[in-house]
Image (cartoon, helix red, strand yellow):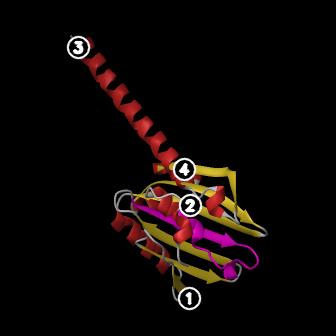
Amino acid sequence: MMFKRIRAVLVVLAVLSSVTVGAAADLRKELVNALPTAAQAKPWTPMVETTTYGEGIGLTEIYDGGYKKYLDNGVVAAVRRVYRKGGLVAEVVLHRMSSETAAKKLGAIKKSEFGKAAVEQAAGVGLSGGFIVRQPAMAMVIVWGGRERPHLCSIVISGRGADREPKPAALAIAAVRNAAGAPGAAKKAKH
């Protein structure tokens, strides 16, 4: 009798485990597919081999030592990819957030890290908010949006002239719009 109960519990655990693994694989695929395509990224070139995914403690694959801050502020999973344009490099990190409120809060935390640095607003169709910070040889963009599937995207562009990049938010806006289910919308974005 006891053996049958243990066996039943093990079967239930196996089923739950396979559902969790399947859901994680689906989320990974969803996030990777939401990254800007080569067509959306032009004139940037995606370096597909740099794609990294993390979920839970697996965020250490993306964040060296700071992953706990992201987990504590609503990051469920994230995917990272590098894009290149001439001598510039853009590191794009798309985060699936637990809620739109969490995305807005994490955006505010990231913005506060720059203190009194000059901040521009990043705007685009389908975004809830965002900003751009430019410093010598660097531009950082944070945008967020999505009610049913909230996301936050951060981009750090580095290299000589990165602070003069004319449309630094285009990659981030494309990622958030793709994640919300509106592929191709990056063309409509305002900067």
Closer to us: mark 3 or mark 2? 2
Three-letter code for the amino acid on which mark 3 is drawn: Met
Closer to us: mark 1 or mark 3? 1
Chain-order first, disc 1 or disc 4: 4
Above-or-below relation of 33 to 175: above
Occupied quadrant, residue 83: bottom right
Quickly name the residue at label 1. 118
Chain-order first, disc 4 or disc 2: 4
Closer to us: mark 1 or mark 4? 4
Quickly name the residue at label 4. 33
Quickly name the residue at label 2. 93
Residue lying at 60% horizontally and 50% vertically, measured from the top left: 52
Q: Real-space Cα distance between discs 1 and 3?
A: 67 Å
Residue 171 in the magenta stretch? The answer is yes
| Image spot of residue 10 (x, y percent) | 33, 22
Three-letter code for the amino acid on which mark 1 is drawn: Ala
| Image spot of residue 16 (x, y percent) | 34, 31
Chain-order first, disc 1 or disc 3: 3
Residue 93 in the magenta stretch? The answer is no
* 171 and 188: which is toward the camera: 188
Quickly name the residue at label 3. 2
Provide the residue span drawn in magenta: 150-174
Residue lying at 27% horizontally and 19% vertically, measured from the top left: 8
